[in-house]
Image (cartoon, rainbow, N blue to C red):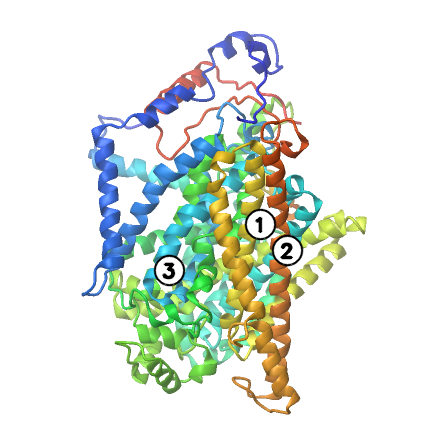
Amino acid sequence: MSSSHRPPEGPDDTTPPGPAGGAPTALDERPPAALDPETVEQENRRWTPAKIALWVGIALVGALGWFMLAIARGEAVNAIWFVFAAVATYLIAYRFYSKFIEDKLVRPDDTRATPAEYKANGKDFMPTDRRVLYGHHFAAIAGAGPLVGPVLAAQMGYLPGTIWIIVGVILAGAVQDYLVLFFSMRRGGRSLGQMAREDLGTVGGTAAIVATLAIMIIITAILALVVVNALGESPWGVFSVAMTIPIALFMGVYLRYLRPGQVMEVSVIGFVLLMLAIVAGGWVAESPAWAEVFTLERTTIAWGIIIYGFVAAILPVWLLLAPRDYLSTFMKIGVIGLLAIAIVVVRPEVTAPAVDVFASRSDGPVFPGSLFPFLFVTIACGALSGFHALISSGTTPKLLEKERQARFIGYGGMLMESFVAIMALVAAVTIDRGLYFAMNSSAAVTQGTVEGAAAFVNSLGLTGVNVDPAMLESTAQAVGEESVVSRTGGAPTLAVGLANILAQMFGGGGMMSFWYHFAIMFEALFILTAVDAGTRVARFMLSDSLGNVFPRFKDTSWRVGAWLTTAIMVAGWGAILYMGVTDPLGGINTLFPLFGIANQLLAAIALAVCLTIAAKRGSFKYLWIIALPLAFVTVITVYGSILKIFSSVPAVGYWAQNSAFRAAKASGAESFGTARTPEAIDAVIRNTFIQGSLSILFVVLAVIVIITALVRTAQAWAHRDDPEHPSRHNTEDPYRPAEIFAPAGLVPSAAEKDLERQWAEYRRAHPQPRRRSHG
Amino acid sequence: MADPSAPGSGLAQGLRRAAGVLGRLGRGVLTGDRYEHYLRYHASTGCEHPPMTEAEYWRDYHAWQDDNPQGRCC
């Protein structure tokens, strides 16, 4: 049964206290705030021949796409099949599976006011149009994750990654985003940590909060590492990314003092300036003197990002973060749209095999480990991302107009993110396969030279792959870089793929260097914004926790406290960043699995919280909707963590690597494996110690939360016939009747259009809205 | 509102309308219409004090944002 506590029937209960005079007539005429459940049911059941034809058509297009990707052999596969397979599958999953989840598990009630309505404050609680909120939410969840993971996953061929990105999102990722969004909205927009504490108890809740903080630090560090790897030894890149800072500062000042609120205007100006910065970067790269200034080592760039992270998080929001956010959102949505159009127009040929040799081995040069579990862990954000649960329980639930819109925004938003991942995969598999491996294998095996890279890639024994050093040189020249060898981290590969595709649409070969640096800057732009935002959130969480012991920290205007907590958080991710940059084994190679596991463990935590909440609501018959992805991701991440901790293969297990290097050091070796100096050996020992400890920490925290959730679920099951029992305690906000109406999905149905018309007439007749005053 | 007697083909009108819709959507996603939402909210509370000016509103909002950070995803 629904656990919403409906007030007794009666006209007076829904009448807000307000000034007399005109109130009874106005409210009598007010249209309902929601469609009748019977009407909704009727509209769902109505299968006209046109509707049937449409869905059969979509299914056929999807089947064709999957057939061409998975089964057809012979000629080279075309990227367009990815688009067909992905879009058709998403549409079918959205129309049927998410609707099923909505009907059976979620059971939203549009007569119930959302917190945006009853807690409206003109700031963070504001009913927002669902289409605008979709863009908002998507911009908040979209980041580098779906761009980097699939690029690395392409090591195993295009098919394993494609299957997980598409199947994983519809069964796990979108389900998580949707449920967290809905449950958070029912609880007044409370965060995941707070929901965990209320529904799992103190132990589970504290574990969830500590895990969230730790995982946020890791994610920030590794995103920063992606930027470092993309900008190392690249004067063009360093110049254009560095220019984003003064551009953002200018935008911030412009908005504050010249034209407050003109966000679109300032974003367009910022965009134009960004384009100029990219072009100017080309001049910098060509001038020997300037190129010298901007050619920085990776360690220098790492320090730069650390200092930037500290300063940016201290500065007021309006000066740097807010304008960066506008620019990032503007660019994200624009570029993703552009890329989608470009893939459909250009239809590039895929060069990677469906399933590569590394799919059945665990010694891949791009990321180590076997397909199960490390493919899933590497793809992370494109299919299932725990970090999204933080966003879905952040600002979005506070902006939802109507309960039924959670499906469109939560489930639909994640589907779009998954589509971005598919496009990133397409970019990675449409470049020369040998080039892909030359770019993504660590410098330890390629020696950082074109000859070394060619030799290494040719030694891998991949069919149809024969790399010529000259090809690597000419690619580097074409994109305006000194070298493309061992440009790990996913961003440079994506940039080459994007440049390849976009150049075929606009501008031809001459534009490749512009598009390459456009893509690098595009990714660095929002990564650095995310680093800033993440540091602020982490410092806020730390201040909050410290405030329980030292009350002074709760005062957000205390400068010293803010500086201190920021410094601690920056030191946290900065240390891991530095560790990754100086790691002789290749930072991305060793750290990305840690990022992926951390992200998936947070997803397991989010799903565990959802499982408990659903069980307490009594939805046992449909609990499998959550239990299935939870079980899968738990198995993947626990097994992955076990391998990372206990595997005796040094390339896979952190502690195995640690003891191998310690043994080498004890035997007095000056160099061992890829570590050429005693300092490098020490670095590996230190790094693997930290990585191994973090792996243990994450898996322990996640297991605590999952076990707590299972216990609470079992308790709820034991009392499934007794909704009043404490184990079934409902932590939702009380029912309040809704007084506004809005359609549920992207396109309003006939009945919704009718109701909208009624509301429009009502508003014309009674222009002054009557609502309770919110102080 | 489209004026049927105005010069220009239906396509041009349709494009202009589409551009208008996209522009408004874009502005909304970038949160440029935040002040309008605030004005509407202020009117609905029936508060007697005049609403904040646009500049005041944004200063207040950014000050609030400083104390209430929001994450941006991975």
| Image disc number at residue A701 | 2
* Mark 1–mark 3 distance (CA, rounded to whole Å): 24 Å
In front of the other: A185 or A237: A185
Left or right side of A463 for A648: right
Residue under disc 3 on the same chain as residue under disc 2 = yes
Mark 3 vs mark 2, foreground winner is 2
Q: Which part of the image, by quadrant, shows the C terminus of chain A?
A: top right
| Image disc number at residue A259 | none
Residue under disc 1 on the same chain as residue under disc 3 = yes
**Could you tell me if residue A391 is visible in this image?**
yes
Q: Name the amino acid type tagged 2.
A: Leu
The answer to whether residue A24 is above or below residue A446 is: above
Residue at horizontal 28 percent and vertical 77 percent from the top: A465
* Mark 1–mark 2 distance (CA, rounded to whole Å): 9 Å
Q: Position of residue A528 (x, y in %)?
A: 53, 60
- What element does badge 1 sit on? helix
- What element does badge 3 sit on? helix
Left or right side of A461 for A110: right
In front of the other: A66 or A763: A66
Residue at horizontal 61 percent and vertical 74 percent from the top: A687
The answer to which quarter of the image holds residue A523 is: bottom left
Q: Which residue is mark 3?
A: A161
Q: Chain of mark 3?
A: A
